[in-house]
Image: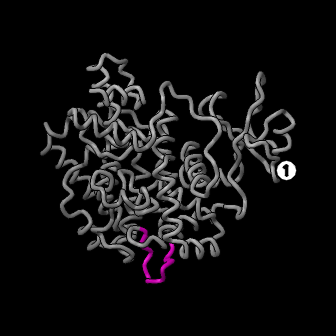
Amino acid sequence: MISRMMASRFVNTGRALCLALSLSLPATAAIADAQFQRWVGQFRATALNSGVSRNVFDRAFAGITAPDPEVLRLATSQPEFTAPVWQYFDNQVNEQSVTTGRHMAKQHRRTLDAIEKRFGVDRHILLGIWSIESRYGEALGNPRVMRNIVSSLATLAYADKRRQKYATQQLIAALKIAQNGDVSINQLTGSWAGAMGHTQFIPTSYQAWAVDFDGNGRRDIWNSIPDALASAANLLKDNGWRSGQTWGYEVVLPAGRKFPSGRMTLAQWQAIGVVRANGKPFPRPNDQAELKVLDGRDGPAFLVLHNFNVLKRYNSSDRYALAVALLADQIAGYPAPTRDWNRPFTRLTFAETQELQKRLSAHGYYNGEIDGRIGSGSRDAIKAIQGRLGMPQDGHPSKELLTRLRGQ
């Protein structure tokens, strides 16, 4: 998340730092540990001066003796920025995320009713955020995803000079969260960048926007779904969410002309030939809108409004905000975009993607989760088996590849 908004601004560090550290740690572990422990001692003084108690600090750092090279590996890429556009949206907006979202809407109807009444944020937007941030909470129990955020943030603050200010600030905030009693130190788990709970707040965003919605006296975004969803709603409301308004519209672009950058009214966009894909008029033609074409003008096109930019306060990526918006619409029952992303292969359904992963695993090429989401492990396995089958090694999860494997 943020809110991963702040974390997203720091994700583009080069692979050299991660590689150098991960290679050097095994060879010089004693030296690295000693250097890291000296840093911990220096940071301890900083934390205490910032109001963190000695007891909380010492308990939080007990057993943390070296930086975590896996954190630095993960820091070199984020799917919002690095994955092909079709891959990012296929992983986030698919049959399973929509079906589960509709189930969660029914299961948590009363909670969502109350959150909408208090904060004015559409429930489907909150469900979209919940899905993308933690797969409706599923990721919280996955040790491959969730880690000790004291260790993660200490690693970034110590080893990554580019993220040092961010990580130091978040680490102090995390220690204060434990000190305030909302969560115990051993429950301070989150992503490699310190994003926590069902809705993946970084610690400073937690301090600013987390709420105790279930009334038990603690702001517990790890274990309380009402607290987590209400906290996300509070963030969006406080950043200017306009109740009852949409995020934007899918549009069709007229052929053979260029389009201005920046914002114009919907009426002005319509005057130069940009119309809604469903053929309906714009309900509020005086709303300011900006054109977003994430996959070239031959892919889906959208005019996005104020609420789209509020979603970017949660995470500053256009892809992220659009994925939340499209998933929210489909959970609510609206159709998928009329134009698909440009992909150089025939797309698999979510179930077929899981089948592909199972077949890759059966052939000994894949040992990851059968989760229907294509990441680096799946792509590497696909390339390997494509090479064995004499196919171009493009790593694409295609119908063509699955058909070949079904015939094996």
Closer to the camera in the image, 75 or 308? 308
Relative to residue 361, is residue 306 depicted above or below? below
* Residue 260 percent coordinates (x, y): 77, 32
Residue at 35%, 47% in the rendered image: 371
Front-most of residues 8 and 121 = 121
Question: Amino acid type of disc 1?
Answer: Asn
Residue in the foreground of this view, choosing between 359 and 39: 359
Q: Residue 304 versus residue 368: which sits nearer the camera? A: 368
Is 3 colored magenta in this rendering?
A: no
How far across and how far down the image is residue 7, in percent? 46, 50
Left or right position of 279 against 14 = right
- Residue 362 position, x and y percent, is 22, 36
Residue placed under numbered mark 1 in the picture? 286
Q: Main secondary structure of the magenta part?
A: loop
**For residue 327, above or below residue 395:** below
Describe residue 86's horizontal placement relative to residue 260 as left or right: left
At a point 53% along the width and 74% down the height, the residue shown is: 111
* Image coords of residue 306 (percent x, y): 71, 52
Residue 114 is left or right of residue 91, and the answer is right
Q: Is residue 389 above or below residue 371?
A: above
The residue drawn where x is 36% and y is 56% is 139
What are the residue bounds of the magenta stretch? 211-221
Classify the position of the C terminus by image quarter. top left
